[in-house]
Amino acid sequence: MPLSFTILAWLGTAVFAFSGSLMGLNKRMDIIGVAFVATLTGIGGGTIRDLLIGRTPVTWVTTPTDIFICFAVAAMACLFYRLFMGRTMKWLIYADAIGLALFSVLGTAIALKTGSHPIIAILFGAMSATFGGIVRDVICSETPILFSKEIYISAALLGGALYLVTPESLGFEIRALVGMTGAAALRIASLVFSWSLNFPSYKNAPDKAQPEYIMEDTDQ
């Protein structure tokens, strides 16, 4: 994989770790708890993907760069939380959207490189992009966003699919940019315009599956 792939992987880990840190801080955890949630969020999806495709030992076991990134992000979030955070959970969902876009493409690219069928590679990309957030939500006693009305895994699937169908002749960077832009645009647009995939009959039903951190918008 090119150097740009490694840089994007580090960036994706950092962004997801940031979203995990914000969740931990919103739950009034200490720095150890925040670092733990940040690490689970940052490496969770990629770890499950690597185990399923037999890419072992997983990268962070032999080269713990991702662990150090998660720890550093958690420490920075704790230090500067009150300085730059206004509406904490809005930062969280947009950080999560960027992480989702990055890992949907990276996960798909890794799965393709290891010989996975293209359709399965897209699914692995979505797994990489969403499982870290699911683990974060479960650890923090939130309803996983995957089970809410939010367009979430659909955006990850779109990112992987766009990466796959973009001609290889354009190079990894262009293919990754196309996939990430599509995933991020769909996810953020769904947040801005309240898009969902609910059936029409659900529209008047009580919304009980909405994650608490989407509903809350409190100043910290």
Image (tube, helix red, strand yellow):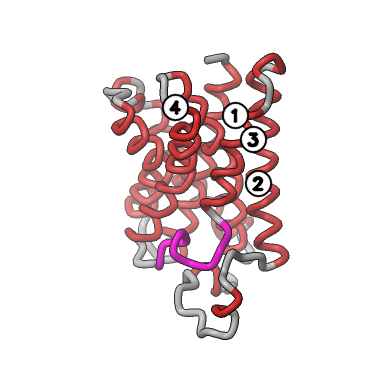
- Marks 3 and 2, the one that precedes in the sequence: 3
According to the image, label 1 marks what residue? Answer: 164
- Marks 2 and 1, the one that precedes in the sequence: 1
Disc 1, SS: helix
Q: CA distance from mark 4 to mark 2?
A: 24 Å
In this rendering, which labeled residue sits more in front, label 3 or label 4?
Answer: 4
What residue is drawn where x is 56% and y is 36%?
Answer: 160
Quadrant of residue 67 within the rendered picture: top left
Contact, CB < 8 Å: mark 4 with mark 2? no
Q: Position of residue 178 (x, y in %)?
A: 70, 33
Q: CA distance from mark 3 to mark 2?
A: 12 Å
In this rendering, which labeled residue sits more in front, label 3 or label 2?
Answer: 3
In this rendering, which labeled residue sits more in front, label 2 or label 1?
Answer: 1
- Marks 1 and 4, the one that precedes in the sequence: 4
Q: Position of residue 204 (x, y in %)?
A: 58, 85
Amino acid type at mark 3: Leu
Q: CA distance from mark 3 to mark 1?
A: 5 Å
Quadrant of residue 215 within the rendered picture: bottom right
Amino acid type at mark 4: His
Contact, CB < 8 Å: mark 3 with mark 4? no
Residue 150: in magenta span: yes
Q: CA distance from mark 3 to mark 4?
A: 15 Å
Q: Is residue 183 left or right of residue 39?
A: right
* Residue 39 position (above or below residue 137): above
According to the image, label 2 marks what residue? Answer: 184
Q: CA distance from mark 2 to mark 1?
A: 16 Å
According to the image, label 3 marks what residue? Answer: 162
In this rendering, which labeled residue sits more in front, label 1 or label 4?
Answer: 4
Looking at the rendered structure, which numbered label has been put on residue 117? 4
